[in-house]
Image (cartoon, helix red, strand yellow):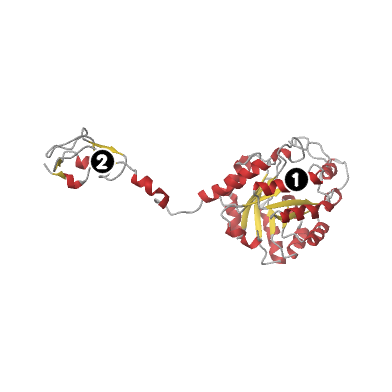
Amino acid sequence: MPINSLTHRTRPEIVAELSANHNGSLSQALALVRAAAEAGVDAIKLQTYTPDTITLNASSPDFIIAEDHPLWAGRQLYDLYREAHTPWDWHEPIISLARDLGLDAFSTPFDESAVDFLEQLGVTRYKIASLEIVDIPLITKVAATGKPIVLSTGASKLTEVDEAHAAIMRENPEALVTLLLCSSSYPARPETIGLANMEMLRQRYRARVGFSDHTEGLGAAIAAAALGAEMIEKHIKSDDAQSGVDNSFSSSEAEMRLLVRYAGEAALAAKDVKFGPNEDEKESRRLRPSLWVTKSVAKGDVVSEKNVKSLRPGGGISPSQYSRVLGLAFSRDVSPATALTFDLLTEQ
């Protein structure tokens, strides 16, 4: 779908992040693109780096992930990124397949050489990863392409988001920016997300907003749709995946299909609709209870709990008037299952 039509959706744009879930296999990466298309998502996203463009091959403590990390404890950064990266010569077949299947395809560059490479592939837009939000030279180079930018805000202070957003605006004042609320913990706990902050980001930066989801399951993403997310990014994995760098917080094709469906339903349910009965409720209003004559009565009989009750459907006097009609007399003989109306009553 063209980028300029994204704001006219009836549901959030769903982006399937391939990340490291190819597990070192191009055929697996291509299978994930097909799975994403089958699930009904709108776009796939890659990450464009090599271990040498993102870190140093060093083993000092600075380059080792903390021992209490739930997924990658004690791993050397270089080794982790060597396992996780998507080889650059895979990008073209992955992007081509995505386009053939009707999906948009874009990527996250992690250095300036990646931007140059992705420009050659004609990507439609760029994402700035949460941790790179402080890399102003990289952000400036991306903004200079003139293409839309998705800016993830995980682990960021507002002053850092301010600076990154300002850098984009200086380079391209007309840039279409989407700010993604994000928790950069892996996996992220739902109670740390703060989805209500999407509206703050929308108002502060006058930008599109969305959610980059690293939680397990779909609850947070569907809640984000209900709260106005215009984009939801979720990592995709194969249905039978048992292991992998991102496996624990990624969604299978079946789960992505559910996300597409329920995010759309959540967004529709949260639309601003004037309070009051709608056209779909016409029959429900007809079936509301009203006052009905429940047994044969003769002219002059008094209305009581024995011969008039509040029952479904409508057609008679509202039950709210029950106390008013009790004690009145019937003005004529009335059969059971007759809706009680004021023309059937008279003062005694």
- Residue count near mark 2 (Cα–Cα under 10 Å), binned few <14, some 14–19, many ≥20: many
Is residue 155 in view?
A: no
Residue 21 spot, x, y in % from top left: 76, 43
The residue singled out by tag 1 in the image is 31
Asked if marks 1 and 2 touch (Cβ < 8 Å), the reply is no
**Tag 2's secondary structure?**
strand
**Is 76 situated above or below 208?**
above
Find residue 123 and report its image quarter.
Answer: bottom right
Q: Residue furthest front?
A: 335
- Residue count near mark 1 (Cα–Cα under 10 Å), binned few <14, some 14–19, many ≥20: some
The residue shown at (18%, 40%) is: 334
> Image quadrant for the N terminus?
bottom right
Is residue 118 in view?
A: yes
Residue 71 spot, x, y in % from top left: 75, 37
The residue singled out by tag 2 in the image is 291
**Is 287 situated above or below 43?**
above
Residue 24 spot, x, y in % from top left: 82, 43
Label 1 vs label 2: CA separation?
A: 63 Å
* Left or right side of 341 for 35: right
The disc labelled 2 sits on which kind of residue?
Leu
**Is 280 situated above or below 336?**
below
The residue shown at (16%, 36%) is: 297
* Left or right side of 86 for 189: left
* Left or right side of 300 for 34: right
The disc labelled 1 sits on which kind of residue?
Ala
The residue shown at (58%, 47%) is: 263
For this rendering, which residue is in front, 225 or 173? 225
Residue 191 spot, x, y in % from top left: 61, 40
- Of callouts 1 and 2, which one flags the residue occurring earlier in the amino acid sequence? 1
Q: Nearer the viewer, mark 1 or mark 2?
A: 1
